[in-house]
Image (cartoon, coloured by chain):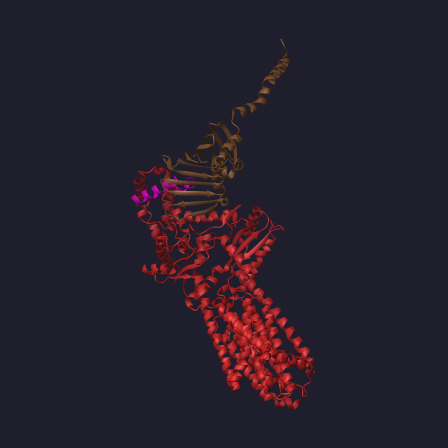
Chain colours: A brown, B red
Amino acid sequence: MPSTPDLHARLRRLLGAVLLPALLLAPLAAQAAEWPAAELFKLLAQQKSGRASYIEKKYIGILDKPVESSGTLAFTAPDKLEKRTLKPRPELLRLEGDKLYIEQAGKAPLNLNLSSYPEVAAFVDSIRATLAGDRKALENSYQLNLLGSADKWQLILLPKYTSMSAILTRIAISGRQGEVQRIEFALADGDHSEMLISKVGP
Amino acid sequence: MIARLRTHALPLGLWLLALAACVTVILHTRFIADLSAFMPKAPNARQQMLIEQLRDGIIARLVMVGIEGGDAASRAELSRQLAARLRQDPAFVGVQNGEASVETRDRSYFFDNRYLLSPAMSAERFSSEGLQAAIGASVEKLSGDAGLMLKKLLPHDPTGETLALLEQFAGGQQPRQLEGAWASRDGTRALLLVQTRADGSDTDAQAASLERVRETFASLPAHQAGHRLLLSGTAVFSVTSRERIQSDIHRLAIGSSILVIGLLLAIYRSPRLLGLGLLPVASGLVAGIAAVSLVFGNIHGLTLAFGSTLIGESVDYSIYYFIQRAAGIEASRFWRTMWLGVLCSLAGFAVLLVSGFPGLAQLGVFSMAGLVGAALVARHVLPALMPQQLQISDLSAPARLLDRIFRSLRRLRPLLLAGALAATAWILWQGDTIWNRQLNALSPVTRAEQDLDMALRNDMGAPDMRYIAALTAPDAERALQAAEAVGQVLRAEVAAGRLGGFTSPAQFLPSRQTQQARQQALPDEASLRSRLGDALRELPVRAERLEGFVADVQKARQQPLLSRADLAGSSAALGVDSLLIQRQQDWLVLLPLRAPAGQEELDTRALEAALQGAGQSGVTVLDILEESTSLFASYLSEAKLLVACGMGVIFLLLLAALRSLPRALRAVAPLACAVIGVTAGLLASGTSLTILHLIGLLLVVAIGRNYTLFFDAGSHAGNAEQQRQVQVSILVANLTAVGSFGVLAFSSVPVLAYLGCTVGPGAFLALVSAAILARDQDASAH
């Protein structure tokens, strides 16, 4: 009957033999299993332009059912993004560099500098920088987390700064290869929205 | 000597009495230095009043502040620190820099009082159908891009009143935000807007306020070596131009005094003669200041600076007197010529009296009174004080030399005439392009300062106040009611796309009448609940989510009506104060208008017609830019006429005195050559002519005719020796005039610089032309 200290020593040895390599290997295994982010951003960056239609649903707490809108999206690398809402109210949102242009039916168009509204900037940049494959721009405001494979990936963006996380808890962007198919926003107050995107052309 | 004094007792006594009286007046004179005196007056009293209001009202109390250097974060920090200090300072009424604290206050003012402020408020809006439509629209808006931001408003403001009232301000630009403070468009400057407590017209207090801003900025903890402070605005303009004018006055006075004294000493070589020579000048200055003070109640610093030219003109009298007396020229003949000269000068300066510039009218009175005073003293006082035997240094050697030079100049006559003809042709060929029609060409504010002002104004998104609808009312309440009535017409114009937008004080503070009407449109709790129940039947919102709305509406029904005091600390206060202005008799409402998007110009006539058609006939629609440009053009044509008249009068005076048309024409010919020569010179140097150049040309004629007259008088005078002495006196007189006007040319105040660079060279050209055109047979009587 081995003494208690002996048992402890053997257990430690066992743990060392089995767990340590496992611990060391775990990240490697995870990396091998998951698709590297660099690959995704390379694919995304290759899409120099694209046109798509979208349907967006907003789930808002005070409303009994989600509100839905639809329209088209157009992106031109590196920094031009146009969101044209057709239903239920026509609206145009055009983003180019630091300039945000907003047009609403029956109202004077608005020109804004994104840098004046850092929160809005972080919001719209999450989509634009993803489409552009601009990892650096995303990492300025978000912590990135990529799941899945090239054919079914999901990029999770978590806000880095409290100014942003007070509004937004998480953005989930998913797609297939270089194509973004779905964008979900989860807001800090529990509301959320999802946007389904189907590609129409380059 | 005693006997001589006795015979001259009367003029001496009168002179001393007059001096004492003038000094008494001067001691009670207010000296001013604001720049508006040298801007043209508006012809129409109503426009004048409005322009003054824009200049002296709240606009004149706003200082735009820029902070440069360092990085964006440090600039924003400086902006916050500066704003915090200045808000504590009693010299300032308000400071805005885009800080969150003020924005929050603004937002809460508009949100808390939305039911009294919203232009969409009506009883129908709070019926079941109205509520359904308004809430339905709000729900629909939630689906849009701004939906996630608007949703916070919905439980308390389901009808969207906050948005409806904020939309009134859309299209007006806000400065860009950087690091939590206003910044320029390119992000290299932090911006603040400071409102001083002191009135725009109180330049001393404004200067002190600006100094406070500078001192405070320099003492901020975050201030580093690389940071710079920029200030602009009407207050800054008036303070800096006053400083500039004051330093100019000193410079010009010292410069021309040294010049003239040096010249006189060189010729007389006698301090006593120098003192006597300056006597008419000093008396003239005193008389001029007293006269201006009596006529206008104050004297402008620039008028004093102009005094240096008076020195140049009036010192001539003693020069002529001394030299010609020493030469033994008959006194009566000499004085006849001199009085004719004085009359011609008066004719020239009289034109200034009727010019549209209040400051130039002062110059006119000053010069006329000064010249008459100087001439009287030279005529009646100098002889009493003159030494029995005039010991003037022997000028015969330089006189002979001068005579030879003048003689040889006569060979240039064909060249001069040919040159004058060519220059005339060249000037005529350029046609109307020789005139400068820019109003700010006369402003003492430098180009760089104007550019900075423009840059800050653009960054601020400040309304450029080019288009303004204005109306008056007997009290504030009626003024706001009138503004609301006009606003209704303007809103229709905006909807039709004929107007880009407008700002009205009633958007910040509606009339009590309107506030009451809006309050009465709100239903009581029971009816609101039942109507809400009907309205929500078709909508995805449950009534229990809108408890905040029901409570807020009940609060709004009872809330006291808004007054100016409720605006304190918000930027709406500035909006009301700058657009609703109390005056002595009445209240003035200004409604700045914006041209439709993508359009530079606004059709003011069509707008006025639309307002009249809607029964709003008490409203004037002004295009400030056009008003001032057309104003300036009308002044230019007026000045052309006046200058032509002045020159005509001078010619008639010459004709009357010389009693011979050929002699009068000969006397005028050198003046014509001088005027043409100076004009061509100015144009060749790239200057386009302003009203001041035109007036300068008149002065060239008024002063230059002295030389031709004396040449003419000389040509008919006795001996060659006298003739040569006359030439010396003319040259000395000319040099003092050229010198004293030449000093003006270096003034940093355009009004004076333009006069100086026209009259200085012009006077010299007049002398040279007179010498060239003098007739040989007249002059060579030796």
Of B58 and B502, nearer the camera is B502
* Quadrant of the snapshot with the C terminus of chain B: bottom right
Q: Measured along the vertical axis of the image, is residue B184 above or below residue B725?
A: above
Res B545 → quadrant: top left
Q: Position of residue A61 (x, y in %)?
A: 40, 35
Count of labels in the image: 0
Which of the two residues, B68 or A37, is positioned nearer the viewer here? A37
Whether residue B298 appears in this view of the structure is: no
Give B35 or B763, whichever is nearer the viewer.
B763
B261 is within the stretch colored magenta: no
Q: Is residue B131 magenta?
A: yes
In what quadrant of the picture does the N terminus of chain B appear?
A: bottom right
Write the residue at 49% across / 54% down: B458
The answer to whether any part of residue B141 appears in the image is yes
Across and down, in percent, residue A144 comes to 52, 32
Residue in front for this viewpoint, B74 or B99: B74
> Overall secondary structure of the magenta stretch?
helix
- Classify B102 as above or below B668: above
Q: Position of residue B521 (x, y in %)?
A: 32, 49
Side (left or right) of B129 relative to A174: left
User: Residue B209, relative to residue A137: is it above or below?
Assistant: below
Q: Position of residue B455 (x, y in %)?
A: 52, 55
Location of residue B32 by image quarter: bottom right
Report the span colored magenta: B129-154
